Amino acid sequence: EVQLLESGGGLVQPGGSRRLSCAASGFTFSYYAMTWVRQAPGRGLDWVSIITSGGSTFYADSVEGRFTISRDNSKNTLYLQMNSLRAEDTAVYYCAKAPRAGGATNYFDYWGQGILVTVSS
Amino acid sequence: EIVLTQSPATLSLSPGERAALSCRASQSVSSYLAWYQQKPGQAPRLLIYDASNRATGVPARFSGSGSGTDFTLTISSLEPEDFAVYYCQHRSTSITFGQGTRLEIK
């Protein structure tokens, strides 16, 4: 059974940093692209970043230069390092996996339960 | 960047009725469109991929159609558990979501 479990959320001050983790199980993690999607309170889904199975990374303009996505295949874990945090980064952050091993993906078939990051003084 | 516009913003229907949710792309996305369902406090759930393919475990009352710029998610006969928010999504140079349609009980 595929499981994705986010951790690392919490309250952080504006300008601060936070690292989110997403522990994966139930599939061969290294074979799949993984993504982060966030949802501000009461708002819609907002894509953040994606990392391919080969390690290529892509970011939304709103987080480019501030957030870094990475993966540790030996630990079956996806990360999101968030720096220079702003109030507008307050959201539930979800990790999700691509449906097929390797290559590009156009959608995501399994999602974690999400973790809340609150940026406030 | 491709913009996805969903309509209506809110749809009020009764159990047993048919629901049709629209997603319009600002330029052609071929058939590369997915639909997700999200219930309060839960993660999104993949329903439809590549415009018309049901994801594993999705009931047959859910169907997707369309290509190019106009897409529809149809729920043939609403069950109580279907009342939720629905999002369409596409990947081009980035990944974009529509703003969502809230399906509420009338």
Image (tube, coloured by chain):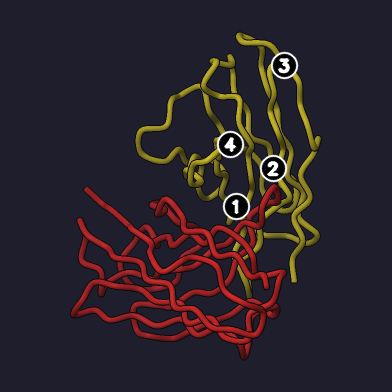
Chain colours: A red, B yellow
The residue carrying pointer 4 sits among few (fewer than 14), some (14 to 19) or many (20 or more) residues within 10 Å by Cα, namely many
> The residue under label 4 is which amino acid type?
Gly
Instruction: Give the chain letter at badge 4.
Output: B
Q: Residue furthest bottom?
A: A65
- 3D distance between C-alphas at marks 2 and 1: 8 Å
Q: Secondary structure at mark 1?
A: loop
Instruction: Give the chain letter at badge 3.
Output: B
**Residue that label 4 marks:** B64
Name the side, left or right, on which B62 lies relative to A8. Answer: right
Q: Report if the CB atoms under discs 2 and 1 are less than 8 Å apart.
A: yes
Upstream in the sequence, badge 4 or badge 1? 1
Q: Residue at x 72, y 38 (%)?
A: B101
**Residue that label 1 marks:** B33
Where is residue A47 drawn, in percent x and y?
A: 60, 65
- 3D distance between C-alphas at marks 2 and 4: 7 Å
Upstream in the sequence, badge 3 or badge 1? 3
Callouts 4 and 3 in the same chain: yes
Upstream in the sequence, badge 3 or badge 2? 3
Front: mark 3 or 1: 3
> The residue under label 2 is which amino acid type?
Phe
> The residue under label 3 is which amino acid type?
Leu
> The residue under label 1 is which amino acid type?
Leu
Closest to the observer, A95 or B95: A95
**Residue that label 2 marks:** B71
Name the image quarter holding residue A19.
bottom left
